[in-house]
Amino acid sequence: MTIWIPDISERSGPRYLAISDAIGDAIEAGELSPQEKLPTHRELAYQLGVTVGTITRAYKEAERQGHLVGEVGRGTFVRGGNLPENQFAVIHRQETGVIDMSLNFPPDCGRTAQFAQTLKNLSRSNTLHSLLDYHPAAGTTHHRQAGAEWMSTGDWKADPEEVLVTTGGQHAISSALMALTKPGDTLLCEEFTYPVTKVLAQELGLKLHGLAMDDKGLLPEALASACQTDSAKVLYCMPSFHNPTGIYMPEERRQEICDVAVRYGLTIIDDDVFGHLHPAPAPPLASMIPDNACYVVSTKNLAPGLRIGFLRVPKHILAAAETAIRTTCWMAPPFMAEVVTRWIEDGTADQLIKEQYTEANYRQKIAEAHLGRHGYRAPNHGAYHFWLPLPEPWREDRFLALARERGVALIGSDTFAAPRTPLAHAVRVCLGCTHDRSRVDQGLEIISQILDEPPRDSLTVV
């Protein structure tokens, strides 16, 4: 990681503009090169004695001026050279030989062939024209019914009237937050959380409060303590396949979390985008406390490019959530919603999930073969990511840099840390983004080799 630190001592005006201008001047002077990675928001804020929010505004301004490009989960880079303009550089990394283990979505286990067949069927449908028109912001009754079926589990059946169609899981989360919060509110979350939620909280003017976890997930006593000392009314959490740690919260702990929520009048946003990959899923929080919980599922495990999500909300915030969808995108794409609906109804979705589960377990066994001597044990479910704590004396930044140098892209704990969460010195390893099993095997071998080596300190002469 670059150690470039701007000098803004003689620059006037708002600090974020001074930092942004310093970035532009450094690029022009050749001090910053194309593709060079800038310090993290937290690191630069510490070095300059400003808030993390100031650095975020500075980087955004520099992006607006065309100097930088941000990649969710990877960092902020100087624009130029062969650096891709989009956030997710999967194709580019494959072309340059980088083994991408940084992005969390499953490989193609037959989805392309299924999609081609569905397109063929749709092309012969006499209702194709209707999919090109405007639809209700909440989605059509047909699509909402499919969403309710997709999120129902065990004895719990979602009510289609409480289900909204969204443009992916991220849009479902943002719509729920818009319906439940106002600027200045506190949003509770796990101490390590989905990075996009950190950005959403900032954009919506929310104060993010991270809560302690153990090996079963969010601690009920930490949640209760936060409710006693704070005015927070919303909790965002990931009980199933927590991102990034991979923890799967047992049913007993889920009930304890729900009990706290009811006691303090808290509404929970249960993000369950990976939940279908468990062979015997635990009940969603919304099934336990339907009046106090929203529930998010998506098609990420079927095909992330479909960008369809389903949001179940209590009836008393249904209108507000629908308004949030209408305000942000008017409606989810009806064509994609129709593809997903057909897959749910004809069993394609279930078949693809079975294939994903089998593939995930196979890859987890590869990971255990390479990292078993470092303490890693493959879980008995279909997760495509896992959390790898780094042994002493490894530091996260040094490990990430060396892995990148040897051709493996990973993401460290700092990307997921809620404000004031201590650095964990751990990395998230994703097994699905790289489609070729042999490349997964190669990447895991590189990670294992690095762990076998002691980190080398560099000598700085001052």
Image: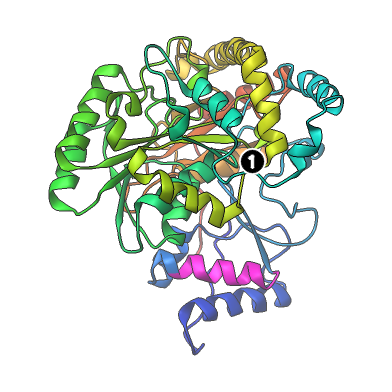
In the picture provided, is 242 more to the left or to the right than 102? Answer: left
For residue 423, side relative to residue 113 (left or right): left
Residue at left 32%, top 38%? Answer: 268
Give SS at disc 1. helix
Q: Position of residue 331 (x, y in %)?
A: 61, 47
Relative vertical location of residue 268 with respect to residue 37 in this rendering, above or below:
above
Q: Quadrant of residue 341?
A: top right
- Please tell me which residue lies in front, 66 or 145: 145
Residue occupying image coordinates x 24% and y 30%:
258
Residue on which the image places disc 1: 404
The question of residue 439 being in magenta is answered with: no
Residue 376 x %, y %: 45, 18
375, 360: nearer the viewer: 360
Query: What amino acid type is highlighted by mark number 1?
Result: Arg
Residue 82, visible in the rendered structure: yes
Residue in front for this viewpoint, 168 or 20: 168
- The quadrant holding residue 334 is top right
Q: Position of residue 183 (x, y in %)?
A: 36, 63
Predominant secondary structure, magenta span: helix
Q: Which residues are magenta?
A: 54-66
Examine the rendering and report whether any part of residue 352 can be seen: no
Instruction: Answer whether residue 58 is magenta in the image.
Output: yes
What residue lies at 62% left-to-right and 22% top-to-bottom? Answer: 445
